[in-house]
Image (tube, helix red, strand yellow):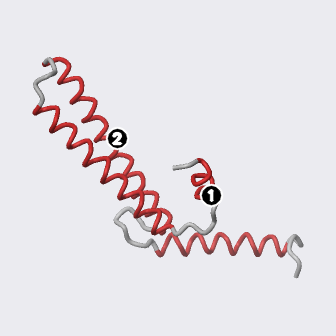
Amino acid sequence: MATRDRESIAGSCDIDPERLLKVAVANYEDVILDLHEMRASLRASESYSETEFRRVVTMVSRSVQTVYDERKRLDDFWKRQAGAGDDGSFDMEAARAEIGRRLDRIRSAQDAGDLPG
Protein backbone atom coordinates (compact mmCIF):
# COMPACT_ATOMS: atom_id res chain seq x y z
CA MET A 1 0.00 0.00 0.00
CA ALA A 2 1.33 3.42 -0.86
CA THR A 3 2.31 5.76 1.97
CA ARG A 4 -0.32 8.23 0.81
CA ASP A 5 -3.03 5.57 1.10
CA ARG A 6 -1.95 4.66 4.64
CA GLU A 7 -1.92 8.30 5.69
CA SER A 8 -5.38 8.93 4.26
CA ILE A 9 -6.75 5.85 6.02
CA ALA A 10 -5.10 6.73 9.33
CA GLY A 11 -6.20 10.35 9.20
CA SER A 12 -9.71 9.83 7.92
CA CYS A 13 -12.70 10.27 10.17
CA ASP A 14 -14.88 8.59 7.56
CA ILE A 15 -13.56 5.09 8.24
CA ASP A 16 -16.34 2.58 8.72
CA PRO A 17 -15.32 0.61 11.83
CA GLU A 18 -17.21 -2.48 10.69
CA ARG A 19 -15.43 -2.45 7.33
CA LEU A 20 -12.08 -1.95 9.06
CA LEU A 21 -12.79 -4.91 11.34
CA LYS A 22 -13.70 -7.10 8.36
CA VAL A 23 -10.45 -6.15 6.61
CA ALA A 24 -8.41 -6.90 9.75
CA VAL A 25 -10.11 -10.27 10.22
CA ALA A 26 -9.55 -11.17 6.56
CA ASN A 27 -5.87 -10.30 6.93
CA TYR A 28 -5.55 -12.46 10.05
CA GLU A 29 -7.20 -15.35 8.22
CA ASP A 30 -4.85 -14.94 5.24
CA VAL A 31 -1.78 -14.95 7.48
CA ILE A 32 -2.95 -18.03 9.38
CA LEU A 33 -3.61 -19.91 6.13
CA ASP A 34 -0.21 -18.88 4.74
CA LEU A 35 1.55 -20.04 7.90
CA HIS A 36 -0.37 -23.32 7.84
CA GLU A 37 0.66 -23.92 4.23
CA MET A 38 4.25 -23.02 5.08
CA ARG A 39 4.32 -25.54 7.92
CA ALA A 40 2.79 -28.25 5.71
CA SER A 41 5.34 -27.60 2.95
CA LEU A 42 8.17 -27.75 5.50
CA ARG A 43 6.96 -31.11 6.71
CA ALA A 44 6.79 -32.40 3.13
CA SER A 45 10.27 -31.10 2.30
CA GLU A 46 13.36 -33.20 2.79
CA SER A 47 15.86 -30.43 2.12
CA TYR A 48 16.21 -29.43 5.79
CA SER A 49 18.21 -31.14 8.49
CA GLU A 50 16.25 -32.24 11.55
CA THR A 51 17.65 -29.30 13.54
CA GLU A 52 16.81 -26.75 10.86
CA PHE A 53 13.37 -28.25 10.43
CA ARG A 54 12.57 -28.01 14.14
CA ARG A 55 13.89 -24.45 14.32
CA VAL A 56 11.79 -23.29 11.36
CA VAL A 57 8.65 -25.12 12.52
CA THR A 58 9.08 -23.55 15.96
CA MET A 59 9.35 -20.10 14.38
CA VAL A 60 6.23 -20.71 12.28
CA SER A 61 4.34 -22.00 15.33
CA ARG A 62 5.32 -18.89 17.29
CA SER A 63 4.14 -16.74 14.40
CA VAL A 64 0.78 -18.54 14.39
CA GLN A 65 0.45 -17.95 18.14
CA THR A 66 1.30 -14.28 17.68
CA VAL A 67 -1.44 -13.95 15.07
CA TYR A 68 -3.94 -15.59 17.43
CA ASP A 69 -2.86 -13.30 20.27
CA GLU A 70 -3.23 -10.22 18.08
CA ARG A 71 -6.64 -11.40 16.89
CA LYS A 72 -7.76 -11.77 20.49
CA ARG A 73 -6.51 -8.27 21.27
CA LEU A 74 -8.49 -6.96 18.30
CA ASP A 75 -11.63 -8.76 19.46
CA ASP A 76 -11.19 -7.40 22.99
CA PHE A 77 -10.69 -3.89 21.62
CA TRP A 78 -13.90 -4.03 19.58
CA LYS A 79 -15.83 -5.41 22.55
CA ARG A 80 -14.59 -2.52 24.70
CA GLN A 81 -15.53 -0.05 21.97
CA ALA A 82 -19.02 -1.53 21.86
CA GLY A 83 -19.30 -1.40 25.66
CA ALA A 84 -19.54 -5.16 26.05
CA GLY A 85 -18.67 -6.97 29.24
CA ASP A 86 -16.36 -9.96 29.52
CA ASP A 87 -19.10 -12.29 28.32
CA GLY A 88 -19.93 -10.08 25.32
CA SER A 89 -23.05 -8.58 26.90
CA PHE A 90 -23.66 -4.88 27.37
CA ASP A 91 -23.06 -3.86 30.99
CA MET A 92 -26.03 -1.62 31.82
CA GLU A 93 -24.89 -1.01 35.39
CA ALA A 94 -21.48 0.21 34.24
CA ALA A 95 -23.14 2.41 31.62
CA ARG A 96 -25.49 3.92 34.23
CA ALA A 97 -22.59 4.56 36.59
CA GLU A 98 -20.54 6.24 33.85
CA ILE A 99 -23.49 8.41 32.77
CA GLY A 100 -24.06 9.35 36.41
CA ARG A 101 -20.41 10.35 36.86
CA ARG A 102 -20.50 12.48 33.73
CA LEU A 103 -23.74 14.19 34.77
CA ASP A 104 -22.26 14.88 38.22
CA ARG A 105 -19.22 16.52 36.60
CA ILE A 106 -21.46 18.66 34.41
CA ARG A 107 -23.58 19.69 37.41
CA SER A 108 -20.47 20.49 39.46
CA ALA A 109 -19.02 22.59 36.67
CA GLN A 110 -22.33 24.42 36.20
CA ASP A 111 -22.67 25.08 39.96
CA ALA A 112 -19.11 26.41 40.06
CA GLY A 113 -19.93 28.83 37.27
CA ASP A 114 -17.61 27.15 34.79
CA LEU A 115 -20.45 26.62 32.32
CA PRO A 116 -22.73 29.32 30.99
CA GLY A 117 -26.20 28.96 32.47
Tally the marks: 2
Name which residue lies at 26% across and 34% down: 60
Marker disc for residue 66: 2
Picture quadrant where residue 117 is located = bottom right
The answer to whether residue 45 is above or below residue 112 is above
| Other-residue count near label 1 (Cα within 10 Å), few / some / many at <14 / 14–19 / ≥20 | few
Marker disc for residue 8: 1
**Outermost residue toward the front in this view:** 2
Q: Which of the two discs, 2 and 1, labels the residue nearer the N terminus?
A: 1
Q: Amino acid at mark 2?
A: Thr
Q: Position of residue 90 (x, y in %)?
A: 43, 73
Q: CA distance from mark 2 to mark 1?
A: 28 Å
Q: Position of residue 99 (x, y in %)?
A: 61, 74
Query: Taking 93 as reference, is 68 left or right?
Result: left
Nearer to us in this view, 91 or 107: 91
Nearer to us in this view, 60 or 102: 60
Circles 2 and 1 in contact, beta carbons < 8 Å = no
Q: Position of residue 96 (x, y in %)?
A: 55, 75
Query: Taking 62 as reference, is 113 left or right?
Result: right
Q: Looking at the image, is mark 2 or mark 1 nearer the viewer?
A: 1
Q: Amino acid at mark 1?
A: Ser
Name which residue lies at 58% across and 58% down: 9
Q: Position of residue 95 (x, y in %)?
A: 53, 73
Nearer to us in this view, 41 or 97: 41
The answer to whether residue 24 is above or below residue 58 is below
Helix, strand or loop for disc 2: helix
